Amino acid sequence: MDHKRSQRGGVQVIPRPNSWRLGNPSPWSALTEKKIEIKHIVKALSERSPSGIRGRTPTGEERDAAVLVGIYDDNDPHLILTRRSPNLTSHRHEVSFPGGRVEDEDIDLWTTACRESNEEIGIRTDELSPLGRLDPIVTVGSKSLIHPFVTILPERPDLELNHSEVEKILYVSLRELLLDEVWREEEWQLPNGWVSITFFELEGDTVWGATALMIRQLLTLSLGVSDDLGRFPKEEFQDEREI
């Protein structure tokens, strides 16, 4: 067993099927310099709109949800993630971006991301604005179409977690996410064929699934690396809401 990898990962339950195998190295593994600065993120994401849907082919029955991909600089860009409360009925201990499903009072998806993030971690969103958007992701378990909004924070914010929903707030540097020992891809044999699953093994936590796919796209866009894993072309996909 790799010693560095053995010290990483968390208690998250991974529903790994009986038939699986290790996947590919990270899309940035061949780069001689793996460094991302805020200016790279701004250049890559400024006013970006979705170019397709990732995850699974949408059925049209998914409920819209939105998450806030908040980034601040502390000698290196950092992401704000949450570990879900163990008291929840589903997805206990899983790591995700703050956010949730659209409610009737939300005027648009950005409003949803801000409202849910404020409820979960107490972040003040009145002075925030969306930098750009990552591709929406279809999730199977929750039957959601998740819309990620990237925003740049002026500094690390003072946060107050909602203990009924969040167990812990994670501040994760992009430098750590780019480490070889943090990356893992697996290929799972599911009823519809082999599917690639992305993992980031942090100290004490495993990020996987939709959240890992969002982080993967954020990193590849910021590094200028091509990666179309699980992407279905936009074609007739259109948001019903304007931001």
Image (cartoon, rainbow, N blue to C red):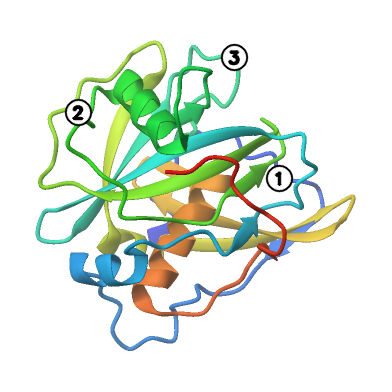
Task: Provide the residue designation for mark 2.
Answer: 124
Q: Residues within 10 Å of mark 3 (few under 14, many from 20)?
A: few
Residue 142 in the image, given as x and y percentages of width and height: 66, 30
Instruction: Tell me which label, 1 or 2, sits earlier in the chain.
Output: 1
- x and y percentages locating residue 22 in the rendered image: 66, 66
Question: Sequence-wise, which precedes: disc 1 or disc 3?
Answer: 1
Q: What residue type is labelled 3?
A: Thr
Q: Is mark 2 on a helix, strand or loop?
A: loop
Q: In this view, does 228 lie to the left or right of 127?
A: right
Residue that appears at 42% across and 43% down: 243
Closest to the camera, between mark 1 and mark 3, is 3
The residues bearing labels 1 and 3 have C-alpha atoms spaced at a distance of 20 Å
Q: Residue at x 61, y 71 (%)?
A: 228
- Answer with the quarter of the image where residue 198 lies: bottom right
Q: Mark 3 points at which residue?
A: 89
The local crowd at label 2, few if under 14, some if 14 to 19, many if 20 or more residues have their Cα within 10 Å, is some
Q: Can residue 180 be seen in this view?
A: no
Q: What residue is rendered at 23% in x and 52% in y?
A: 78
Of pointers 2 and 3, the one earlier in the residue sequence: 3
Query: Is mark 1 in CB contact (under 8 Å) with mark 2?
Result: no
- Helix, strand or loop at disc 3? loop
Q: Is residue 100 left or right of residue 45?
A: right
Q: For mark 1, what is the residue?
A: 16
In the rendered image, the vertical position of residue 13 relative to residue 35, given as above or below: above
